[in-house]
Amino acid sequence: MNETLTLCFVWLSGGALGAIFFFSLWWTVRKATASKQPAAWFFGSLILRMSLALAWFYFVSAGDWKRLLLCLLGFVMARLVVTWITRPSKKNKNHPEQEERHAS
């Protein structure tokens, strides 16, 4: 029973990590597109998100391939959920924002 609870914790922690990872990616894209230095935003976010993800996978797996696989499964499932939550509404799909006219 203890092993089952541990594996459930590993799966949930992978989901939490994935949610943090993909929500921060979504937030970075929104902020960087309005920034004067988008490359710095994207590069800094990439380094921070990847460092966090790799460290967490290493910590949670503890050298066990089953834990690593379950954590990765939770991570990928979180990607699907975050993608579903952050998708544009139907209102925005039917009437996309028009870009500013820079040249006439």
Image (cartoon, helix red, strand yellow):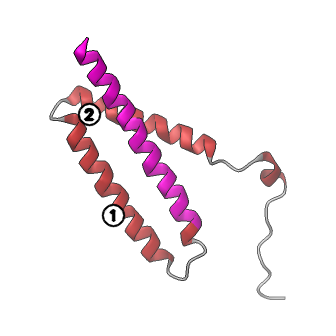
Q: Is residue 66 left or right of residue 94?
A: left
Q: Is residue 19 left or right of residue 88?
A: left
Q: Is residue 100 above or below residue 66?
A: below
- At which x and y percent is residue 31? 56, 68
Dot 2 falls on a residue whose secondary structure is: helix
- Badge 1: few (under 14), some or many (20 or more) residues near its Cα, within 10 Å? few
Main structural element of the magenta stretch: helix, strand or loop?
helix
> Does the segment drawn in magenta span residue 40?
no
Q: Residue at x 59, y 71 (%)?
A: 33
Residue carrying label 2: 68
In the rendered structure, which segment of residues is drawn in magenta? 1-30
Specify the quadrant of the image occupied by residue 44. Answer: bottom left
Dot 1 falls on a residue whose secondary structure is: helix
Q: Quadrant of the C terminus?
A: bottom right
Q: Residue at x 53, y 38 (%)?
A: 80
Q: Give the residue type that dot 2 points to.
A: Leu
Q: Residue furthest bottom?
A: 104
Residue carrying label 1: 47
- At which x and y percent is residue 58? 21, 43
Contact? badges 2 and 1 (CB < 8 Å): no
- Badge 2: few (under 14), some or many (20 or more) residues near its Cα, within 10 Å? many
Q: Is residue 78 above or below residue 94?
A: above
Q: Give the residue type that dot 1 points to.
A: Ile
Specify the quadrant of the image occupied by residue 12. Answer: top left
